[in-house]
Amino acid sequence: MASDKPVLDISNLHAGIDDTPILRGIELEIPAGEIHAIMGRNGSGKTTTANIIMGHPDFEVTDGGVQLDGEDLLEMEPWERARAGVFLSFQYPQAVPGLQVGNFLRKSVAAIRGEDEAKGTEFRKKLKNAMTELDIDRSFLGRYVNDGFSGGEKKRFEILQLMLLQPKLAILDETDSGLDIDGIRTVAKGINAAVRGTDSGALIITHYSRILEHVQPDRVHVLIKGRIVKSGGPELALELEERGYEWLEEEANPPNGNMEG
Amino acid sequence: MAAKEAREAVGEYKAGWHDPENATIRFDFGLSEQVVRDISALKNEPDWMTEIRVKAFHHFENRPMPTWGNMSMLEEIDFDSICYYLRSSDATEKDWEDVPENIRDTFDKLGIPEAEQKWLSGVTAQYESEAVYHSIREDLEQQGVIFLDMDSGLKEYPELVKKWFCSVVPYQDNKFSALNTAVWSGGSFIYVPKGVHVEMPVQAYFRINAKNMGQFERTLIIADEGSSIHYVEGCTAPTYSTDSLHSAVVELIALPGAHIRYSTVQNWSANVYNLVTKRGIAHENAKIEWVDGNIGSKLTMKYPAVILKGEGSHAEVISVAYSGKGQHQDAGAKIHHLASNTTSKILSKSISKDGGRGSYRGMVSVSPKAENCKLNVVCDALILDDGSRSDTYPTMEVANPSARCEHEASVSKVSDEQVFYLMSRGHSEEEALAMIVNGFFEPFTRELPMEYAVELNKLMALEMEGSIG
């Protein structure tokens, strides 16, 4: 079923918020089965990129396009994007008091994968296996969505949703932040299980290379001031770890201001 | 756009149809001493009841309107254009087959006979002023449980009724308890003998069908020592452009060790004034719980109350209120700790949307002689848009220093980030709002019988429809 179109195709994407430009011409392609990482400092536009792919209403796209498997995402409402196969693991997942985790998972699987996928023993088995994989206790299902969750619990819950929703494109926004090393290993296992050996693609957004030791990316892109200034293999993440971002910032903004230089 | 406007005009209300009026007896509009006497005569009541009615009528006439709640809406009530008694069926039937067809269809549409078969111990269905259907499971009857409509209760058990009628809510309590006492008709009369536990709930359903109707049911529940009962009531009415008035009085008596739970899901159409007095007395170690949901009506003023009269008694009032366009829900609770070692808990949740207004009005008091009382009050409000309003009027009068009082209040708004999060999981904006709203009401819905909880969730999802601009 592999299509020849990339899972995600971003071309010349310009976007901002309240007339302030944030993204200035992003180009990015993720072929089926690949995991890519976007790295960059705070404020470089990483989370904005994730939000725009998911359709956050605060951001305005001023130019360029975003396609999922050849379909134009920018025309769709956020829930239509989710149903088309986009998943975002949030940096700050929202609490919904009174909404039970088990109920929410069932409703979300029904909305995205269809009613039939959300009932019966098959669903329960899948749910149980995913929870075991992520080291999540059964009692979790009776709690309220993200309400009173620790940082680590929130991140595990995001990955649990990822495993059940089986999206075409998984975007993981700072999934490693707030996790200890065991937590990182556990969520990495979940990400690998959801993407490796499938036709899906994943985009990992992070500013440390820690998680990339456990989820080996096929490509690493460096985002500076709303542009991808450098792309490379997994070794680029290690280089950034050693050298920081300054040398790339200089490349992106030559000191003499001469763009041709 | 036209469809949206049409929907706004009639609201999302799903119980708003009406039957043709087939009154067998219909009083002229307006109220006088003669009307009160006529109602009593029609019912062949004992003299003492006629006298209470007449006294209550005069009290009603002289008593000014409440100076709180929503005074401008109260002033709009035109007592002269209300019909105070209307009977559509000549008898209270024990078999749905014998209920006049159009009335039976209405209750069918509301799902009452179906619910009765599945999960209820007994049902009273009131249409306008009188009960049209009434039934109780035989095994309960054999155990001595009395479950009747109030008029039959007065006929068959006059001494019991005389002893307790107006003992918890005197007619002088407020203007509307006086009105109810003057013109009451229908409602439930329940007596549960010592030590009997009624396992499945009994239900009363109140339906107003006619325009400009006044419905004044009167309910009296006596749970004898060590007994227990769960009573549930529902109510709906057609949507009309003119107003109707629903003004009930409910009196509960929980004798030592008894447990009464009284659950309501009020879903009147947006042209009904709902001005109700509900109060219970809890004797030693008794427990009274009001589970009170207010979804419909134009103006509701209702504060279920418990008087903790006996040592070790306990009161709980869990309520939710939803105020949409043009609605004001002024609801809350009152609890009076008169005895030592009594405990109480109030949980109030209100949602306002489309310019609706929700108010929590509460009063908790501890008398000087009541030692070691515990009180807990929590009120949460959720506001869905900028034009809507929420107010809190909590009062605590604690005259004994040994009392332990806790009070928490919160007001929150639905955040865009919350909605976006849910949308990113495949749920439309309306579905996302319904999830947030139902989650907010969850501490209430989990106290309801499952069938009611499902119904309430559906109702709220319906309220969220067409709400996205």
Image (spheres, helix red, strand yellow):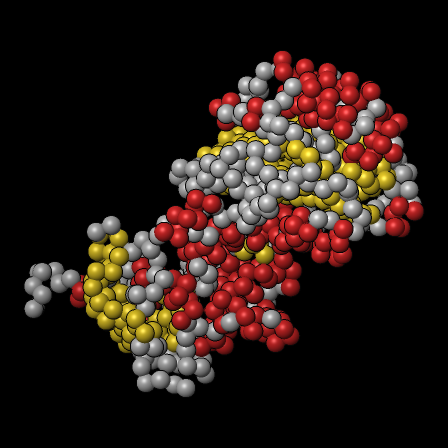
Say which of A136 and A83 sits in front: A83
Locate residue A246 relative to residue A79 in the image: left or right.
left
Q: Is residue B75 above or below residue B7?
A: above
Asked if residue A211 can be seen in this view, the reply is no
Q: Is residue B421 above or below residue B245?
A: below
Q: Is residue B197 above or below residue A139?
A: above
Give the x, y percent position of residue B268.
58, 40
Locate residue B235 relative to residue B130 in the image: left or right.
left
Tell how many labels: 0
Residue at image coords 60%, 27%? B29
Give the x, y percent position of residue B240.
51, 39
Give the x, y percent position of residue B425.
46, 63
Residue at image coords 48%, 37%? B241
Residue at image coords 38%, 67%? A81
Quadrant for residue B9, please give it. top left
Say which of A73 and B89 sits in front: B89
Say which of B104 and B274 sits in front: B104
Locate residue B131 relative to residue A47 in the image: left or right.
right
Quadrant for residue A31, please give it. bottom left
Give the x, y percent position of residue B188.
76, 37
Say which of A134 and B1 sits in front: B1
Q: Is residue A196 above or below residue A142?
A: below
Residue at image coords 54%, 22%? B68
Asked if residue B137 can be seen in this view, the reply is yes
